[in-house]
Image (cartoon, rainbow, N blue to C red):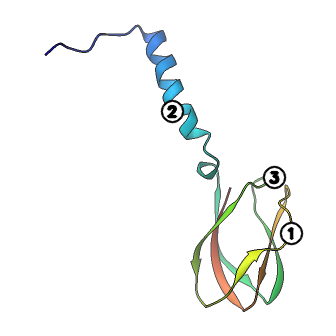
Amino acid sequence: MSLPQKLPLELMQTKWASEINPVLKFPPINGVLLKNIALSIGDNSINHLLQRVQQGWVLTDQDASANIYRGKAFNSLTLTLTSDAVVNISIWCY
């Protein structure tokens, strides 16, 4: 069995960058967890804290039965969620 060939530092850095950069650029990695958001029936505007146009969201916790969906297009300040019941949620915004 042969030992792996040693690579020059510059080549190793290039190789590492080519492998890790796609992971770091994956949109859900760069998100914010918003906990205990109280939703009322109808449209609810939530400051997503991203300071950029949002790309998506994932419901991470919900304390009651409710249908929840995005009510308006993504923008740089808020996420509008529409709910058919009073519920507390936590969401990952990215």
Q: Is residue 7 left or right of residue 82?
A: left
- Residue type beneath disc 3: Val
Q: Residues within 10 Å of mark 2 (few under 14, many from 20)?
A: few
In what element is the residue under mark 2?
A: helix
> Mark 1 or mark 2, which has the lower sequence index?
2
* Residue at 86% across, 69% down: 72
Q: Look at label 2 and name its amino acid.
A: Ile
On residue 20, which mark appears? Answer: 2
Q: Is residue 44 left or right of residue 56?
A: right
Disc 1 versus disc 2: nearer the observer: 1
Upstream in sequence: badge 2 or badge 3: 2
3D distance between C-alphas at marks 3 and 1: 13 Å
Residue 72: which numbered mark, if any? 1
Position of residue 78 measured from the top left corner of the image (x, y, whole percent): 83, 64
Q: Quadrant of residue 62?
A: bottom right
Alpha carbon distance from label 1 to label 2: 34 Å
Q: Nearer the viewer, residue 81 or 52?
A: 81
Q: Position of residue 23 (x, y in %)?
A: 54, 39
Alpha carbon distance from label 2 to label 3: 24 Å
Report whether residue 34 is seen: no
Q: Name the outermost residue toward the left.
A: 1
Give the structural element (helix, strand or loop) at label 1: loop
If you read the primary sequence from the N terminus, does the residue marked by circle 3 or circle 1 appear first? 3
The reply to whether dot 2 and dot 3 touch (C-beta < 8 Å) is no
Image quadrant of residue 68?
A: bottom right
Q: Amino acid at mark 1?
A: Lys
Q: Quadrant of the C terminus?
A: bottom right
Q: Measuring from the top left, give residue 58's x and y in whole percent.
A: 63, 66
Eye-nearest disc, 3 or 1? 1
Which numbered marker is on residue 53?
3
